[in-house]
Image (tube, rainbow, N blue to C red):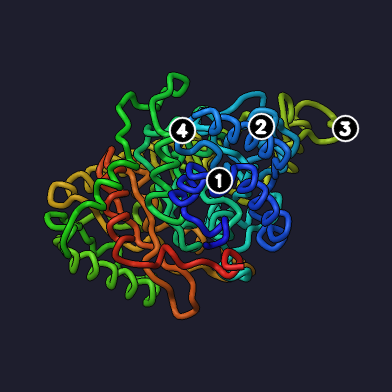
Amino acid sequence: MAELHQLSTQQIIDGLANKQFSSVELTTHFLNRIEKLDSQVNSFITVTGKQALAQAEEADKLRAGGDTRQLLGVPMAHKDIFCTKGVLTTAGSKILHNFLSPYDATVVNKVNNEGMISLGKLNMDEFAMGSDNSSSYYGGVHNPWNLERVPGGSSGGSAAAVAAGFVPMATGTDTGGSIRQPASFCGLTGIKPTYGRVSRFGMIAYASSFDQAGSFGKSALDCAYLLQAMAGHDKNDATSIKRDVPDYVQALKDAESIQGDKPYNGLRIGVAKEYFGAGLNSEVEKTTRDALAKLEELGATIVEVNITDPKTTLATYYMLAPAEASSNLSRFDGVRFGYRCEDPKDLTDLYTRSRSEGFGAEVQRRILMGTYALSAGYFDAYYVKAQKVRRMIAADFAKAFESCDLIVSPTAPTTAYAFDANLDPATMYLGDVYTIGVNLAGLPALSLPAGFDNDGMPVGLQLIGNHWQEAKLLETAHLFQQHTDYHTKLSDIANG
């Protein structure tokens, strides 16, 4: 039998149900791995070992008493952007280094209601601003596939923890690709659902009209289990949509029953030339085209579609998202909670130094960008114009979906780059060039492992769906994973 940390979520669920191991044994195994190995990866900001073991003991008692919740006693961890009652919640920032949340985010509450065991809070780019997890106040996260490479961002801690075998699944958030790009870099499956599918209540905001919570796992089925627990309407979130949540897990199990060598018969896959232009690494392009050939071999029909030039979506995003960030982050003023500078001379000095000392360079950069875009002299020229382009981007996607069921592209233009690459901000922003359009349009999208480059680093394939089509994305990914084994490969740390 494989080590406990090498089991899939389904195998863990079955093992708990069949009494092959207890939740306490499982939780202890993961906690021991974190204590022994996370110093190399730096994926956790806070480990809640004592609390996790107490939850595991309670889960074992409930199972013994006949509780049949599938995820009861299954360990996981949260990106440190979700408020967690009584637990340090930092958003990867110095300005929240001492913040103990007085309440649980809806996502945390929903997962708790399923009886899952939280092992702690995961490292991230500060306030989710970054593409390589280097902007965290708590230090950068290292990629378990190669510790000299980045894991992607901003949910890099979540991706690294799963890829290292510290947790079987984890929550993340995606504002412009912050689940999908780390999933690609770390050889995982990660899904960003339709905007409004998962509550944002208690999720510390970066850009409110873009942010959406999602899940990481080794496979589409892993992601389906966690997304099932997270999704649903929430009266505490005005952007949460009142819409029934499909049974994602059952949909994937039903998909397994499709017989024959053409399981994708009738599926129309859209491919846009705009995703294969300058800047795309040749090995990533080859892997993507090989994956498309595999989809076609399994019965899918490839359809050419057109979408907005990704460089236009990139420019639009980096006008709008920082504008929202400059507004959202105004609440961190050194007065009500979080970091406060020492011995301020007056109120202005308190505001200025608390924010200057509490925010990192990337956050300050985006606040300045956003404030500039919202200023009286430039609001119409930049912000309003970008909002109009956002509508055009959404319309281009809608037109593309008239002729296809899903759109497929590379997730990122490269594989994980060196930890000490010290990319300039503009180059780093280009890492999101294929993912950002999805957030501008509020669409669901998923990244799944599709191969490896010549250095053995994972390459991700992005599947983009129309609104509310998470089940279609997960089914397509699941069938692909029934006919390939990229998702079963483990990093050296997870193999240990």
Between 393 and 473, the one lying in front of the other is 473
Q: Is residue 50 above or below residue 221?
A: above
| Residue farthest toward the right in the current orientation of the protein | 343
Residue 108 in sight from this viewpoint? no
Q: How crowded is mark 3: few (under 14 residues within 10 Å), some or many (20 or more)?
A: few
Up the image or down, 87 lies above or below 477; here it is: above
Label 2 – label 3 distance at C-alpha: 18 Å
Which of the image's four quarters has the C terminus?
A: bottom right
How far apart are labels 2 and 1 at the CA level?
Answer: 15 Å
- On the image, the x and y values in percent for residue 169 come to 51, 48
Please identify, in this view, whether the residue under mark 2 or under mark 4 is nearer the observer.
4
For badge 2, the amino acid type reads Phe
Which numbered tag is attached to residue 343?
3
Determine whether the residue tagged by mark 3 lies in a helix, strand or loop.
loop
At 55% from the left edge and 46% from the top edge, which residue is drawn? 128
Camera-nearest label, 2 or 1: 1
**Viewer-nearest residue: 250 or 24:** 24
Residue under label 1, please give it.
128
Residue at 27%, 62% in the rendered image: 274
Q: Which of marks 2 and 3 is in front?
A: 2
Residue identified by numbered label 2: 332
Q: Is residue 274 left or right of residue 98?
A: left
Are the residues tagged 4 and 3 within 8 Å (C-beta)?
no
